[in-house]
Image: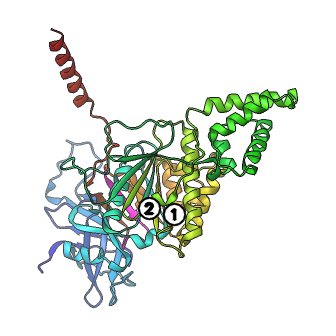
Amino acid sequence: MKRESIGFVLDGATPLQFSFKVEKGLSIPLHEYVVVEIGEDRKVLAEVINVGSKNPLASERPAGETFVTDVYNYEVATVEVLGYLDENGKLSKPKIAPKPNTIVYKASDEELQKFYSSNEERIPLFIGTLLHRPNVKVPVFLQDLSFHLGVFAQTRGGKSYLAGVLIEEILTKTYFPVIVIDVHGDYVMMDRLVETNQKHNDFHVTIYYPPGAPKIFGVTAEDKELKISLNQVEEEAFMDMLGRIGELQEAALREILEELKDSGKPFGFADVMEKVKEKIESQEVKAENKRRFESLYARMKDAEKDVKLPAEGLNLQEFLQPKTLSIICLRGLRSKVQDAYTAVIVDLIFNNQVKYFGKDLLKAPPTFLFIEEAHRVASKESSRYAVKALSTAIREGAKFGLYLCLISQRPRSISPEIMANIGNYAVLRITNNQDQSIIESASESFSHRLIEDLPALNQGEAVLVGPYVPIPAIVKTQKRRTVHFGATPNLLEIQKRIINEIEKRRKEKW
């Protein structure tokens, strides 16, 4: 294989970094990959982390005072050494530096693919190609999602799109179920193909709407009501759904819940309200206690629109069928209700896995849980119940086959304890310094150099870091096979449709 020479090593090289002078007429982009030989024909891979132009005749005088010919212009590229493949195919760091004037070659696609090779035992999935190298697929290993995954980017950075690609890969290449807690409705069209807009048979999609949640127009996937009974919900979670209530009202509510539980019968939100009403109308309840129940009733009446927990409970096994995508669509509900539902789902799934994993794989198979707007249930400002549920699941879940993917535009708001349990990262464009610092401090694999790259990423470009990728890589997210519902509305296209509709109605009128 003939190699493409692109320059030679300059003085001052170290085993982990060196600069090289680029051959005349060539331009090397950031994040290009190069190869040099050190020692006994050992090929070392390196990534370009900085490029600059030089001219020995240039001065600080204003342009026009000195003529500087571009004949003497040249480029210098600085690279970070990634390593070489040893006899066992493992990536190793070199102990010696390349010598000055060593020829630098552009890494071929074939060479790069060896470094980003697939390990079938770890179940390789593909969510993108190496930046500048569309023919080099970068595998991410499903086995290593036991370290959980954080998908972070600023708003409209492509988080949900990338997560959708990963979901497609899991569901088309394995039999494991995927559950998505979808706050915005980004995933509800995943039963349809982009190219044909026809339904596919690659995996089954079911959308669950909580009682009272508005259904999304135009969605063709099977939909069901998300039935979570009060018997399945922790008291703390129910309090979160109601919003802030005083200590006296909380005590009154706990008293009623205990009475209903003692009855041994299933009960729902309506049963609790009826019980509160009975207390208000009872002659045996003292006046000061009646006021407590009256304020509680008013609070529940206000929450009734969003919180309609039925007496009939949810059968979790519906979520856990092979090749099934279960989407918990919370769009249109108030934030506190969305957050409470999120925490309840996490808690229920985790408890199910603890109960059955390793004993009955059909009741508790390895399960992948994607959580949108994760910072809302994982921050210090979140409810105690939500933080406890998520902290427990991310700390202990992998032991019981529960693998979490937290998706957020505000990693700085996520509890440090939760961030510390995320081992894999897919980070798209982030410009906020606090977010960058949190990611760098939470991840041992995220170098300061990679952090500095984040503001310059274009939409759809992501830094992949962690055990689930062979080498840290910047990738271009591959195209989705299924429809992404979270795209920004095209205002020009909408305006054309409005004009056409107006013209149509005008003609019908006349």
Picture coordinates of residue 77, whole percent (x, y): 28, 65
The residue type indicated by label 2 comes to Tyr
Q: Which residue is mark 1?
A: 422
Q: What percent of the width, then of the height, locates residue 44?
A: 30, 79
Q: Percent from the top left, x then y, of residue 121?
A: 36, 80
Asked whether residue 108 is in view, the answer is no
**Residue 84 falls inside the magenta stretch:** no
Tell me whether the residue at label 2 lies in contact with that at label 1, contact meaning CB atoms closer than 8 angstroms: yes
Residue at the image point whose x is 33% and y is 43% from the top: 485
Does the stretch in magenta take in 469? yes
> Which disc is residue 53 wearing?
none
Query: Which amino acid, mark 1?
Result: Ile
- Tell me how far mark 2 sits from mark 1, CA to CA: 8 Å
Q: Which mark is residue 425?
A: 2
Q: Is residue 79 left or right of residue 509?
A: right
Residue 80 vertical placement versus 291 (above, below): below
> Alpha-carbon neighbours of circle 1 within 10 Å: few (<14), some, or many (≥20)?
many
Q: Residue at x 50, y 36 (%)?
A: 212
Magenta highlight range: 460-471
- Quarter of the image containing the N terminus? bottom left
